[in-house]
Image (cartoon, helix red, strand yellow):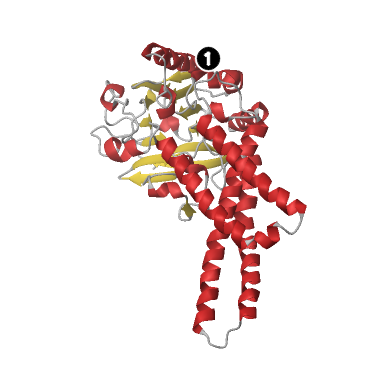
Amino acid sequence: MHKKIGLLIVLISFIASEIFFYNYLSIEINTSRLTQFTYYFSLFLFFGMFGKAVFSDVTEPFKIKSYLGNFLLGFAFTLLVTKLTFVFVALIGESINQLIYFTLESEVENNVQNRTTLIKMIATAISSIPFLSFLYGITKGKYNYKVLNVPVYSSNLPIAFEGYKIVQISDVHAGSFDSKRQVKKGVAIINKQDADLVVFTGDLVNNFSAEVKPFIPIFKAIKAKDGKFSITGNHDYGDYVKWDSEELKRQNFDNLLQYHSEMGFKILMNEHIRITKGEESIAIVGVENWGVAPFPEHGDLKRATKGLTNDEFKLLLSHDPSHWDEEVKNNEMNFDLTMSGHTHGMQFGFDLGKFLKWSPIKYKYKKWAGLYENKGQYLYVNKGFGFLGFPGRVGMWPEITVFELKSK
């Protein structure tokens, strides 16, 4: 249902903008055969990709996405955003233009036309910004891995873990990848960090466990001195596709758990494990996906922390950052650091530091990217390693987070 509503909104937006766009630029469009071909090709591309999105069968056997297919889908979306931007700027400009014409008696038609020409130039210049940005996002940005170093201070940290280095990745969404070479590049960057521990905070696939099979040897190559740990995210349960039977759905999930193991990750299913150095230790707690409706609530903090004490240092892996506000930060069991993902930073926006970041996702999630603190407890939201839906990233680059634990 959500997909159908989203596609309907996209279609209505495109048709409305297209009517204005063609009428406003009909002279320029029909100047030559080249401009006509360019215009009608863009229409063909959009409706072709739209039709594919509507009629594609998500239950068909999984194949690695082709670079060309992802590019065409991304380019169609890029054209939509570009045209919407052009139309928005032109409408504002023409509203001002007409206001001047009807307000000033001395105005003549020639002045209106001159301003219209200027408005077209301004709208073209401004709309070129999203065009170039999204074009970069669908070609380079989606694999533009960024390493973010995050020191975390805690008075609860054992001395033996001073300077302990943890690498977090999240939201792989293996079914969206179109290049093994680029994924290998990301893994090489992870290994370059020389981590004590590597954690993965959910959404290994989009829908089907088979999506990750071609990438198992690549992720198996990730190295960590004290091990690799993972959890499940909302996409890992196969809830967004129809299954012929519950047995097939369950088998898909069981296969996913097996693939985590084949990659060398110990998956934590509402359980914990201790990392020990000498006589001191920290606890790694992992819960299944817990989210606010419509996302599933499989996570069980009580079960996951059974046997732990309140005064020992605990790292919680929980896919959805909503969990932190709803259950974690005021829990009777103190969690020193929680690592999440899920939001992707909506794969669009900008992040120029703690006090200067923006993405449309902020209007849905209070905690959507970066480090948050409440009474000495920390939440970190990773923007994700992969991508979903829109085959690109603009401003919200794929993230590899490196935490260094430090005592206060």
- Which type of secondary structure does the marked residue at label 1 adopt? helix
| Residue located farthest toward the bottom when viewing the structure as drawn | 106
Q: Nearer the viewer, residue 9 or 199?
A: 9
Apparent side of residue 178 relative to residue 372 in the rendered image (left or right): right
The reply to whether residue 172 is visible in this rendering is no
In terms of image quadrants, where is residue 111? bottom right
Q: Is residue 289 above or below residue 247?
A: below
Q: Residue at x 37, y 14 (%)?
A: 246
Residue occupied by mark 1: 262
Q: Residue at x 51, y 25 (%)?
A: 57
| Coordinates of residue 91 in the picture (x, y in percent) | 53, 65
| Residue located farthest toward the left when viewing the structure as drawn | 332
| Coordinates of residue 20 in the picture (x, y in percent) | 56, 58
- The N terminus lies in quadrant: top left
The reply to whether residue 402 is visible in this rendering is yes
Amino acid carrying label 1: it is Glu
| Coordinates of residue 213 in the picture (x, y in percent) | 56, 18
Apparent side of residue 373 relative to residue 105 in the rendered image (left or right): left
In terms of image quadrants, where is residue 183? top right
Q: Is residue 279 above or below residue 314?
A: above
Q: Nearer the viewer, residue 97 or 232?
A: 97
Q: Residue at x 56, y 55 (%)?
A: 19
Q: Nearer the viewer, residue 48 or 408?
A: 48
Q: Nearer the viewer, residue 255 or 64?
A: 64
Q: Is residue 1 above or below residue 236?
A: below
Q: What is the count of numbered marks?
A: 1
